[in-house]
Image (cartoon, grey):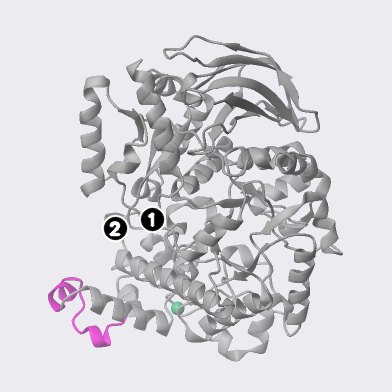
């Protein structure tokens, strides 16, 4: 009895904890007011003959829109596109800035922009590795240096043009600017970056510390010369020497400081662009970033971003990447509008895979996020380089119609989270992705969870006691690599729980299957959902925080995908148990099953005796193809 009461409290506080972890700025507030979870999102890369082509999807948001630079002198055409989107009912419309490059066309026309590109240690301009085939009339898409005033000015103009054309959100692609050129192209050593680094060092270290770093006179210090003299005199040598891991393993001199400087400069520029957009609009403008997989280096500016419209690896690592992305963003209180990577879409275009894409959409929405539709989708593969795929709208239609028809079962709903999974910025930066395995294991075991975020050099967030106490048990993927206050907090929390059985379960992936670890977690909590017959189905409960009497929603996602046939293996007679902790003491009045292209069906259910007066229920779902929803109505 006592345990059950504790469970109910944990669920409710868990719900509250999930929705507002990060400080909420004006752009984010506006997005929370106007964006609905049931909104279908567009990403218009390539444009159909008319925006009417999008209408069957009933889209509500363009999360990643057009970049004004591609309209050249014809900015009126961009304004017309925004109007067309409005005419089909889209209210939230982002313009995009592809911050990677000034674009080959502009580079041909403007000599000052050709001087404003990232250069390597040898002084050679850098072409991003994935843009090697994107030359126009002999001019490549050189990497623009976001520390160079000329390129910054062009980016600022693109922001101004987009907002002036009527966009009310701003999306930044390649938001980490010159910082990202370090790993891909061994940059940037231009005079502006060298001057900026000098100033950064001067602001951070005293004379003695500078001397210890081998800097005699900061006024005349030339980082490029230091790196060359240390033997890192080619692009490849510096790229390897700067590495991506922590300082002791970086061989190039001052690489850690240089990375920190470039990171902070990129973050400052994103802030500046967000402020500019709001100034031009005269009101808050939500800012989104393409934070690839939400990896740590992509999260450095996440405290300034209001949403993520991002490429997420859908197929790699057996599909373990998207769930962590969606749950981590949920913990940060920011929506995700996902797409696949260029390689993922290349795979889809080769196979004509329809069910696979529908799975991606269903997974994103069942986990409370969005998956974008693009009429003409960018694809990339080693063999073909850049190519395009015209996505048939029929691929999206049945799933998006299902979401729109049941909007009230998506809007305002938040995931129920019994268990917390610790996300460690430092561990993930060092490429310890055990957190993905832990999330995957809990999903397969149907243990509702959320993420407890421990920040670091990249993700600016300090884990708090309040966040931890939202969960009954904390799963700590190993190695956790915490230090300081966050490490003390997790350790003390583990000790305090000892009398009731430890509240911390360590998750080591090597050598042991996730099943055993998940069973260990399951033994520490009173089950809220369970799959009693059948297998290979995720059972995902969601509720509206603080609203008594609202139906409880349980998503059922079939995981049994036949890749060769691009089809789901249909499940029949799946029995699901829903624990009393889901219903806050209310009595279950009815269960309705909703699925794609079928009429809602009332299902019989069996009440179970609980430790309280009213217990949980057991219900059998006759068949499940891709995705179904149980709407559980409660009385009083
Ligand atoms: Zn530079």
Residue at x-position 55% and y-position 65%? 286
Please indicate whether residue 156 sits to the left or right of residue 50 in the image. left
Question: Quick one: SS at disc 1?
Answer: loop
Residue at x-position 76% and y-position 81%? 76
Work out which quarter of the rendered image holds the N terminus and state it: top left
Residue 512 coordinates in the image, percent (x, y): 41, 23
Disc sitting over residue 247 in the figure: 2
Q: Tell me the quadrant of ligand 1.
A: bottom left
Alpha-carbon span between mark 2 and mark 1: 17 Å
Residue at x-position 41% and y-position 46%? 431
Question: Quick one: SS at disc 2?
Answer: helix
Work out which quarter of the rendered image holds the C terminus and state it: top right
Please indicate whether residue 545 sits to the left or right of residue 35 in the image. left
Check disc 1: other Cα within 10 Å, few if <14, some if 14-19, many if 20+: many
Q: Give the residue at mark 1.
A: 459
Q: Is residue 67 magenta?
A: no
For the residue pair 124 and 361, the one nearer the viewer reads as 361
Query: Mark 1 or mark 2, which is nearer the start of the sequence?
Result: 2
Q: Is residue 25 above or below residue 443?
A: below
Residue range of the region highlighted in magenta in the rendering? 207-222
Residue that protrudes farthest toward the bottom in the picture = 111
Residue 370 coordinates in the image, percent (x, y): 63, 48
């Amino acid at each position: 009895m006592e345990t059950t009461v504790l469970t109910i409290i944990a669920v409710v506080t868990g719900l509250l904890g999930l929705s507002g972890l990060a400080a909420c700025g004006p752009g984010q507030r506006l997005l929370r007011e106007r964006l609905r979870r049931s909104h279908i999102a567009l990403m218009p890369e390539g444009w159909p003959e008319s925006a009417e082509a999008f209408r069957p999807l009933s889209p509500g948001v363009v999360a990643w829109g057009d970049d004004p630079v591609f309209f050249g002198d014809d900015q009126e055409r961009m304004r017309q596109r925004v109007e067309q989107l409005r005419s089909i009912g889209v209210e939230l419309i982002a313009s995009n800035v592809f911050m990677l490059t000034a674009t080959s066309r502009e580079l041909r026309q403007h000599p000052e922009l050709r001087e404003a590109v990232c250069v390597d240690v040898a002084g050679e301009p850098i072409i991003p590795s994935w843009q090697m085939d994107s030359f126009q009339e002999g001019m490549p898409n050189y990497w623009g240096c976001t520390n160079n005033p000329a390129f910054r000015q062009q980016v600022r103009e693109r922001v101004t043009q987009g907002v002036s054309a009527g966009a009310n959100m701003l999306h930044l692609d390649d938001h980490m600017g010159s910082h990202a050129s370090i790993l891909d192209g061994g940059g940037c050593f231009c005079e502006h970056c060298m001057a900026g680094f000098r100033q950064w060092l001067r602001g951070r270290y005293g004379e003695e510390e500078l001397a210890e770093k081998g800097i005699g006179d900061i006024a005349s210090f030339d980082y490029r010369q230091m790196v060359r003299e240390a033997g890192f005199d080619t692009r490849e040598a510096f790229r390897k020497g700067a590495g991506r891991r922590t300082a002791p393993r970086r061989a190039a001199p001052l690489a850690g400081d240089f990375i920190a400087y470039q990171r902070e400069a990129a973050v400052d520029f994103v802030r500046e662009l967000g402020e500019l957009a709001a100034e031009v609009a005269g009101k808050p403008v939500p800012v989104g970033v393409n934070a690839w997989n939400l990896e740590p280096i992509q999260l450095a500016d996440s405290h300034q971003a209001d949403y993520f419209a991002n490429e997420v690896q859908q197929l790699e690592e057996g599909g373990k990447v998207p769930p962590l992305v969606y749950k981590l963003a949920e913990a940060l209180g920011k929506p995700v509008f996902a797409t696949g990577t260029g390689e993922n879409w290349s795979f889809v275009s080769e196979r004509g895979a329809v069910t696979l894409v529908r799975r991606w959409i269903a997974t994103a929405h069942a986990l409370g996020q969005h998956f974008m539709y693009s009429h003409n989708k960018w694809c990339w593969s080693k063999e073909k380089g850049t190519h395009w795929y015209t996505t048939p709208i029929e691929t999206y239609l049945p799933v998006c119609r299902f979401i729109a028809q049941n909007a009230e079962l998506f809007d305002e709903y938040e995931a129920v989270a019994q268990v917390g999974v610790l996300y460690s910025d430092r561990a993930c930066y060092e490429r310890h992705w055990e957190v993905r395995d832990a999330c995957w294991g809990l999903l397969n075991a149907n243990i509702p969870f959320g993420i407890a975020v421990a920040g670091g050099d990249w993700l600016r967030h300090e884990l708090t006691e309040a966040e931890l106490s939202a969960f009954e048990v904390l799963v700590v993927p190993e190695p956790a690599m915490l230090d300081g206050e966050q490490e003390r907090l997790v350790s003390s929390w583990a000790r305090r729980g000892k009398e009731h059985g430890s509240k911390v379960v360590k998750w080591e992936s090597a050598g042991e299957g996730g099943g055993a670890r998940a069973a260990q977690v399951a033994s520490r909590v009173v089950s809220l959902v369970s799959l009693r017959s059948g297998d290979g189905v995720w059972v995902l409960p969601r509720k509206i925080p603080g609203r008594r009497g609202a139906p409880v929603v349980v998503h059922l996602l079939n995981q049994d995908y036949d890749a060769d046939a691009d089809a789901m293996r249909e499940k029949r007679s799946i029995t699901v148990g829903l624990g009393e902790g889901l219903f806050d003491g209310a009595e279950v009045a009815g269960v309705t099953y909703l699925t794609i292209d079928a009429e809602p069906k009332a299902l019989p259910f069996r009440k179970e005796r609980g430790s309280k007066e009213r217990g949980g229920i057991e219900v059998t779902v006759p068949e499940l193809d891709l995705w179904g929803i149980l709407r559980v109505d409660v009385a009083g």
